Amino acid sequence: MGCARGHGLEQARQILPGYFVCDGPVMRYVPGPAGMHPEPTPCGERFHDGSAGPVAMCACGEPAVDACPMCRSWVGQHCLAVGIGRRCAICTGRERERLRESAAYAAGVHDRRLTELSGVTDPVERLLRAAAYLHGPPVHGAAADRVAELRRVCPFLDVRAGADLDGTGPFPWDSAEVGRWFVRWAGRHGVRPDQELLQGRWLRRRTPAWVIGVGATRTCLVPSGEVVRVTRERTVHRVVRGDPRMYRVALRVERAELPMAGLARLGLLVERR
Ligand SMILES: [Zn+2]
Ligand SMILES: [Zn+2]
Ligand SMILES: [Zn+2]
């Protein structure tokens, strides 16, 4: 006995009891310096052969082609195809159960967090903290419906299904009201703007600001409570005490709205208090 190409068993290596891979020579075209040329290569065929001893069997009764990495029991072709990561049927069942439990656990944690946020009394604080939690990649596995979740936590908002919460607005929240609320909150808690909005020749106008986003679409909340967006800017290079510095100077700003990312940025500051 041997492989289907007619190589003998003595040319094969045993990988499991009674399961072999053939090393017999087969002429194949291989790439070389002068182009493709024929060369003897190992056959590579795998086959079962019980003539020299017992054949490893899968629990389902099929001859085995692999060993389970968890329990080392033999696994056949079919069980391998329907299992998880080369596991046998029993270990695959355990893994499925474990995955179900961890998904259910994560969903439970997420659900409790949404309920907790729904209990925040001040509506603006609730909106900001909900945005901080819901914005960005889902922390709870499966693709969540952010709009539905925001509506659940903040039922006072008129959030339409499929609403774009990241564009330039209009948004279901009042950005000016949110901005004023945040500035009052920041004043009470001693949270100072961490950046500056630079304007004018020679960078003369410097307004402290909480900045949301980067590049030409920067949105800034300034201490008056106003939300503005930089719609045109230029880069200015200056040498300050021997150090080359680069500044971004706003050439044009417009009154703007706070997108979800903006609420999330402010919400994170509120969460950290
Ligand atoms: Zn062969
Ligand atoms: Zn099997
Ligand atoms: Zn196993």
Image (cartoon, helix red, strand yellow):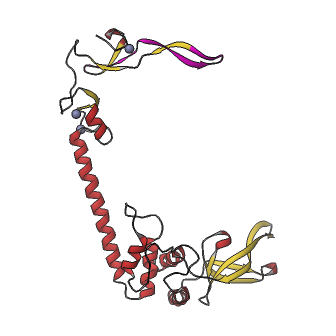
Where residue 200 sits: x, y (%)? Answer: 78, 81
Question: What residue do we see at 49% from left, 84% from top?
Answer: 173
Split into quadrants, the picture shows ligand 2 in the one at top left
Q: Is residue 27 magenta?
A: yes
Where residue 215 sits: x, y (%)? Answer: 67, 69
The magenta stretch spans which residues?
Answer: 16-37
Query: In this rendering, would 119 be left or right of 188?
Result: left
**Quarter location, residue 66:** top left
Vertically, is 57 above or below 51?
Answer: below
**Can you see residue 82?**
yes
Where residue 39 sits: x, y (%)? Answer: 53, 13
Q: Is residue 15 magenta?
A: no
Vertically, is 182 above or below 91?
Answer: below
Query: In this rendering, would 191 be left or right of 68?
Result: right
Q: How many marks?
A: 0
In this rendered view, identify the residue nearer to me: 172 or 175: 172
**Quarter location, residue 24:** top left
